[in-house]
Amino acid sequence: QVQLVESGGGLVQPGGSLRLSCAASGFAFSIYAMRWYRQAPGRERELVAAIPSTGGSTNYADSIKGRFTISRDNAKKAVYLQMNSLKPEDTAVYYCNAHRVTISQVDYWGQGTQVTVSS
């Protein structure tokens, strides 16, 4: 059974930090690219950060570049999102995604974790 379980969300003041974690099970984690998405109320889900299966070059949305860092630990089957200098506009539900394209595209999703940035 495929599972992606996010944790680490919560309420934080502007300028604060949070570290999101995503624990994977039930599939070959090390061969999947991993991504973090977020969805704010009334807005479409957007890609925040991505890391390839090997943990090489990462990609970030312009809105969070320089503030967020994605990383992964294939031995622990986990992916992380370190979020610093948080802003109110970062408030959203954050989702972990496992992505692989071979003959067809495969995507697995977590249930999401709420991040609220407010004073």
Image (cartoon, helix red, strand yellow):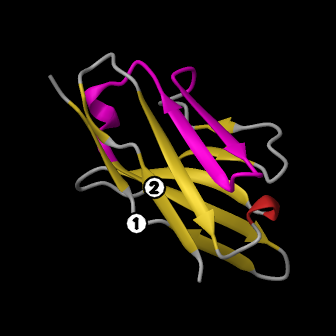
User: In terms of secondary structure, where does tag 2 sit?
Assistant: strand
Q: Is residue 42 left or right of residue 21?
A: left
Q: Is residue 47 left or right of residue 113?
A: right
Residue at the extreme left? 119
Coordinates of residue 43 in the picture (x, y in percent): 31, 54
What residue sits 85% from the left and 48% below the top? Answer: 54
Q: Is residue 84 part of the magenta span, yes or no?
A: yes
* 19 shown above or below 109: above
What residue sits 18% from the left and 28% below the top? Answer: 118
Q: Nearer the viewer, residue 52 or 4?
A: 4
Q: Earlier in the sequence, mark 2 or mark 1?
A: 2
User: In terms of secondary structure, where does tag 1 sit?
Assistant: loop
Q: Amino acid at mark 1?
A: Gln
Looking at the rendering, the stretch of residues picked out in magenta corresponds to 65-92
Q: Name the residue that disc number 2 marks.
A: 6
Label tally: 2
Quadrant placement of the C terminus: top left
Coordinates of residue 28 in the picture (x, y in percent): 77, 70
User: Quadrant location of residue 16?
Assistant: top left
Q: Which mark is residue 100?
A: none
Q: Amino acid at mark 2?
A: Glu
Q: Which mark is residue 111?
A: 1
Q: Is residue 115 part of the magenta span, yes or no?
A: no
Coordinates of residue 79 in the picture (x, y in percent): 62, 48
Q: Residues within 10 Å of mark 2 (few under 14, many from 20)?
A: many
Does the residue at mark 2 contact the one at mark 1 (Cβ under 8 Å)?
Answer: yes
